[in-house]
Each structure stands twice: as C-alpha cells, then as structure tokens.
Image (cartoon, helix red, strand yellow):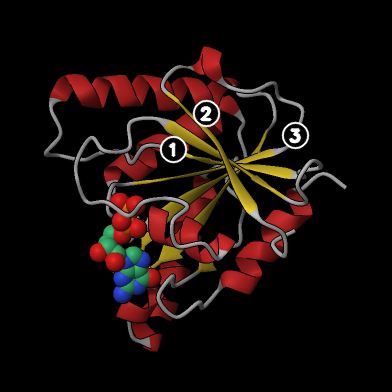
C-alpha cells in the first residue's frame, strides 16, 4: 500500500466538494502543532506532501490523498485542520470546527479517525470533546501518540498506559494506542499495518 506513490487529490473547504465515497477513508486529526503534517509525510515517505506549518489558519481545508497504485487507489487519507488553536481568530475556529465536525459525523466512507496526541502532553480537553463527539456519532477512532522521541522510555510507557486507561469509557475508541515518531520513524510500521487493514482489497 505504501510502496506506491501517495498522490495529493484535492483540498476542500466545504463538504460538497468531497469526492464520491467510493474508497475507504482514514482521517487524521489533532491539535495544531501535534505533528500531524510531519506524521503524514513520514507515513507516505514524501517530504512535500503535507506542508509543515505552524501558522494558525494555514490548513483550513481538508486535504485528501490517495494511497495505492496509480489508477487503482485503495485508501484515501484525509488531513483535517488542526483543532483548538488558541491564537486563531474565533470566527475561523468556528468555521473549522463546523467543517471538521460535519465531515467526522457525516462522511460515509470514513473507516477510522486517527486522533493524534502529543506524547508529552496526553489528552487535552479539546481531544476529549472530539472523542465524545465521535462516540456519539459511532465513528471508530484510534489515538496515536506523536513525538515519542521527545519522551524517555519510562514516561512514554506511563503515558501510553494512562491514555489507554482513559479510553475505557469511550465506546468508539479503538483500544490500542499507537506510539510514533516522525523524527525516528518509530511506530510507523504499526501505523502502516493498521491502515493497510482498512484499505480496499
Ligand atoms: P501540525 O501542526 O500538527 O501539522 O504539526 P507539524 O507537523 O507542523 O509539527 C509541529 C512541530 O513539531 C514542528 O516543529 C515539527 O518539526 C515538530 N515535530 C513533528 N513531529 C515530530 C517528531 O516526531 N519528533 C520531534 N522531535 N519533533 C516533531
């Protein structure tokens, strides 16, 4: 699945522009600066795919990528705008929230949401809000800890255990927490395997 090119499809600012739901889709979401662009780049092995940016408001659209052989893609990745960025103007936050929530609640081919969480910080209130919303919408999601290289082994194990415990109350949460680093490539094989299982045959 990852041996072939990952192709950028399009960016959409409203749901009516989304392509038909003819392929399984996996969405990446998380707080701004969580390392989402870096992870998507590391995953697909392309440096220019998702532009890393710390600028608030830079990624206001849902960016879609196709994975698999050209002409016969097997999975779409949806890179969602980062949520909970305090410095962005309120009107902008509302617009993203509306777009992201509408996508997450209503996108039929969505197979799983990967909720990226900084391994140093754990779940924040905005993450819990997204989780509760996904529980209510019965959309499967999986927590992916990012920037694992910034945390020592002991603290990383503790954080994983803590987050795993916190998922117990969430009905739509996938129980296994993945631990990744875009910097070292740690956890990427596991992430790729998880995605490959969700891809079309
Ligand atoms: P996004 O806003 O969620 O797309 O986050 P970015 O991918 O732009 O990353 C935010 C910052 O964290 C950048 O300075 C990255 O270089 C850094 N970063 C991202 N992933 C990692 C990682 O795995 N390890 C380390 N050490 N830094 C990372």
- Please tell me which residue lies in front, 170 or 49: 49
Which x, y percent locates residue 87?
Answer: 11, 39
Disc 2 on helix, strand or loop? helix
Question: Which of the 4 image quarters holds residue 149?
Answer: bottom left
Q: Is residue 5 above or below residue 97?
A: below
Q: Is residue 134 above or below residue 47?
A: above
The residue carrying mark 3 is 23
User: Is mark 2 in CB contact (under 8 Å) with mark 1?
Assistant: yes
Mark found first going from the N terminus, 3 or 1? 3
The residue carrying mark 1 is 80
Furthest toward the top, the residue is: 16
Q: Does residue 26 appear in the picture of this structure?
A: yes
Mark found first going from the N terminus, 3 or 2? 3
Query: Which numbered disc covers residue 185?
Result: none
| Figure disc tally | 3
User: Is mark 3 in CB contact (under 8 Å) with mark 1?
Assistant: no
Determine the residue positioned at 55% across, 66% down. 45
Q: Is residue 102 left or right of residue 155?
A: right
Which x, y percent locates residue 100?
Answer: 42, 27
Determine the residue positioned at 61% across, 46% down. 7
The residue carrying mark 2 is 104
Mark found first going from the N terminus, 2 or 1? 1
| Disc 3: residue Cβ within 8 A of ligand 1's nearest atom | no
Disc 1 on helix, strand or loop? loop
Mark in the foreground, 3 or 2 = 3
- Please tell me which residue lies in front, 188 or 128: 188
Which x, y percent locates residue 86?
Answer: 15, 39
């Amino acid at each position: 699945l990852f041996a072939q090119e990952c192709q950028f499809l399009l960016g959409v600012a409203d749901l009516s522009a989304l392509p038909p739901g003819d392929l399984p889709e996996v969405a990446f979401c998380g707080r701004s600066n969580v390392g989402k662009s870096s992870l998507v780049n590391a995953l697909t092995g392309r440096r220019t795919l998702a532009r890393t940016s710390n600028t608030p408001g830079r990624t206001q659209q849902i960016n879609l990528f196709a994975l698999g052989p050209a002409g016969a893609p097997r999975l779409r990745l949806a890179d969602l705008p980062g949520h909970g960025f305090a410095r962005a103007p309120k009107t902008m936050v509302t617009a993203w929230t509306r777009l992201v929530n509408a996508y997450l609640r209503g996108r039929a081919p969505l197979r799983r949401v990967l909720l990226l969480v900084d391994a140093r910080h754990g779940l924040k209130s905005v993450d819990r809000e997204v989780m509760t919303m996904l529980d209510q919408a019965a959309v499967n999601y999986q927590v992916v800890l990012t920037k694992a290289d910034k945390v020592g082994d002991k603290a990383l194990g503790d954080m994983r255990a803590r987050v795993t415990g916190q998922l117990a109350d969430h009905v739509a949460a996938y129980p296994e927490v993945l631990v990744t680093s875009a910097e070292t490539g740690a956890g990427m094989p596991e992430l790729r395997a998880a995605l490959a299982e969700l891809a079309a045959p």
